Structures are given as structure tokens and as C-alpha cells.
Amino acid sequence: MARGGKVLTNGRNKNEQFVPLPYAMVRSEAWLSLSSGSIKVYVELRSKFNGGNNGELSLSYATARKKLHLGNSTIEKAFDELEERGFIALIKEGHWYGRKAAEWRATDRPYQGNPATNAWRRWKPGMDFRKTEAAPDTGHIHYLTVPSQKRGA
């Protein structure tokens, strides 16, 4: 018997959580272009989603270094790739002095009453999904496509 409850006929535990990786996502051009470090960061960040905290997902560099065995430059590159390809969107910048990690939202889940955007489905080489804004008239999330460039440059 699995820890935490009865095993169902499909082999899962009733209370077991998982990180969904739909076939459409893992076969997409955006996913296939990700580095292995980016995939590790995505799975760890996405595992923080509990059903109601999209937009508050965070993963500090220190935690990523320890859990994922990645260096700072690899972690930075991973967040950049995931954001550029539309898997995650930055909600709140992190602060070094406040020791506060950035907060992200996963684009495959609804956010603030808006449906999941799944921006990664529309990604093509050269695209960069960086900025999200709510349109003042509709409240819907819109993505601006800008040329690839390093954030903060």
C-alpha cells in the first residue's frame, strides 16, 4: 500500500499529486528546443502549483542549486528560456536584498480568472514571450512578441 492512502485501480493514490506534461507540450517545438537545465527548472517550479497559487510560483537560485545541482548561470538561462518560449511568465521580480525569489505563473493553468494561454504552443524560433499585460477594456492577458534578447540588457 502506498503512503498516505488507498491505491486506486489505476495504480494512483487518491491524494497523489503530479506535474502534468501533456503530449502536446513535450512534442512542441518550444519544448524540444529547451536545454536539460530548463526542463529540470520547469518541472521543479511547476511542482509548486497546488491548484490555486498560479502567479505565486517561486524557485530561488539557492534552492535550485541544491535540489537540481545546477549553477547560477544555468539557472538564469533556464528561467530565460522558459519565459522566452512561453512556458512561464514573470509576475513579480525577485529582490536580492529582501531575499525574495521572483514569482511566476505557469501558462498552462488559468490565472486570475483568465483561461490558460499556453503561449508555448505559438512559439517559433526568434520569438520571445516576455511581457504580459491585461488589456484595459477586456481584462484578458495579451502577449507582446519582441526579438530575443537577454532580460535586463
Image (cartoon, rainbow, N blue to C red):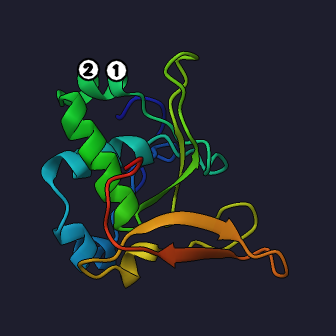
Residue 11 in sight: no
The residue that mark 2 highlights is 66
Which quadrant: the N terminus?
top left
In the picture, the disc for residue 112 is none
Residue 101 in sight: yes
Rate crowding at label 1 as few (under 14), some (14 to 19) or many (20 or more) other CA atoms within 10 Å: some
Q: Residue at x 38, y 81 (%)?
A: 121
Q: Nearer the viewer, residue 34 or 44?
A: 34
Image coords of residue 89 (percent x, y): 50, 57
Q: Nearer the viewer, residue 3 or 34?
A: 34
**Of the residues shown, which amino acid type is indicated by label 2?**
Lys
**Of the residues shown, which amino acid type is indicated by label 1?**
Ala
Q: Residue at x 41, y 43 (%)?
A: 45
Horizontal side of residue 47 vs 137, given as left or right = left
Image coords of residue 131 (percent x, y): 54, 64
Judging from the image, what secondary structure is the residue with disc 1 in? helix
Image coords of residue 83 (percent x, y): 40, 58
Residue 10 vertical position relative to residue 91 in the rendered view, above or below = below
Q: Residue at x 82, y 75 (%)?
A: 136
Judging from the image, what secondary structure is the residue with disc 2 in? helix
Horizontal side of residue 113 vs 24, given as left or right = right
Q: Residue at x 62, y 76 (%)?
A: 142
CA–CA distance in space, label 1 to label 2: 6 Å
The residue that mark 1 highlights is 62
Determine whether label 1 and label 2 are within 8 Å by CB: yes
